[in-house]
Each structure stands twice: as structure tokens, then as C-alpha cells.
Amino acid sequence: MPYTSVLLLLNELEHALHRAGLWHSVAPKPQALASTAPFCCDTMSFDAWLQFIFLPRFTALLESGQPLPAMALAPMAEHVWGQQVEFAELISVITRLDDAVNAA
């Protein structure tokens, strides 16, 4: 899948976070962003990690033409939101993004 399509899915992820009411108006503190735990799970919520770490870093990779790493965000999304029907769209977007990046 071309990088342009992945960029569109990143935009769709941002909109899905907004629609789900999970978009944060305040950034985490620098020490929270410096966590080395997977998804910064010890310092922030998964939705905050998506907004403040994943989206900016992946967008930067795409814009600079860097190769995209394989990824598997959908299992974490299922773990965090799988029992909540109101987050089904968000999980779907993340699953499609995983598939697109891993096929690129």
C-alpha cells in the first residue's frame, strides 16, 4: 500500500480518536513521554500514546520517506477497548492501519 494511503489511515485514526472522545487537549509531561515501557503503559493511557507518540512519529516516518516498521497495535486496542462497543470503529481503524503498514 502506498505511503499516501497509510497517511490517510493515520488521519482517519486521529478523527476516530476525536469521535470516541479520546482526544486529549493537554500533552503528557515530558517524563511520561520518556517511558521505555511498551505503549508507555506505565505513564499514560493507550489513546494518549496513540495521539502523542505514535501519530507524530509515524507521520514523520512517512513524510521523510523512511521505511515503516512492522506493527501490531490492534491486539492492544482489543485489550483496552474490546469490551466497549462504542470503540468498535476505533479498533477497526487500528486494525486496517496494522494491515496496511504490514503489507507495505
Image (cartoon, rainbow, N blue to C red):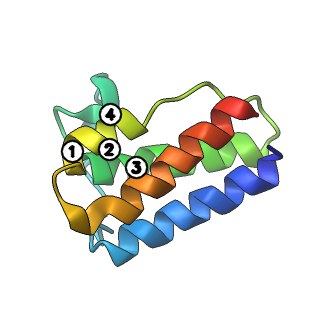
Of callouts 3 and 1, which one flags the residue occurring earlier in the amino acid sequence? 3
Q: Quadrant of the C terminus?
A: top right
57 with respect to 104 (left or right): left
Q: Which residue is mark 1?
A: 80
Q: Are marks 1 and 2 in contact (CB under 8 Å)?
A: yes
At label 3, which amino acid type do we have?
Leu
State the CA–CA distance, disc 4 to disc 2: 11 Å
**SS at circle 4:** helix
Of callouts 4 and 1, which one flags the residue occurring earlier in the amino acid sequence? 4
Tell me the number on the disc at residue 50.
Answer: 3
Residue 70: quadrant of the picture: top right
Q: Which residue is mark 4?
A: 39
State the CA–CA distance, disc 1 to disc 2: 5 Å
State the CA–CA distance, disc 2 to disc 3: 10 Å
**SS at circle 2:** helix
74 with respect to 102 (left or right): left
Estimate the x, y position of residue 12 in percent, counting from the top left.
56, 66
At label 1, which amino acid type do we have?
Val
At label 2, which amino acid type do we have?
Ala
- Can see residue 51? no
Q: Give me the residue at 29% from left, 42% from top.
A: 78
At label 4, which amino acid type do we have?
Phe
State the CA–CA distance, disc 3 to disc 4: 8 Å
Numbered disc in front, either 4 or 2: 2
Q: Which residue is mark 2?
A: 77
Estimate the x, y position of residue 13 in percent, counting from the top left.
50, 61
Query: Which is nearer the eye, 99 or 66?
Result: 99
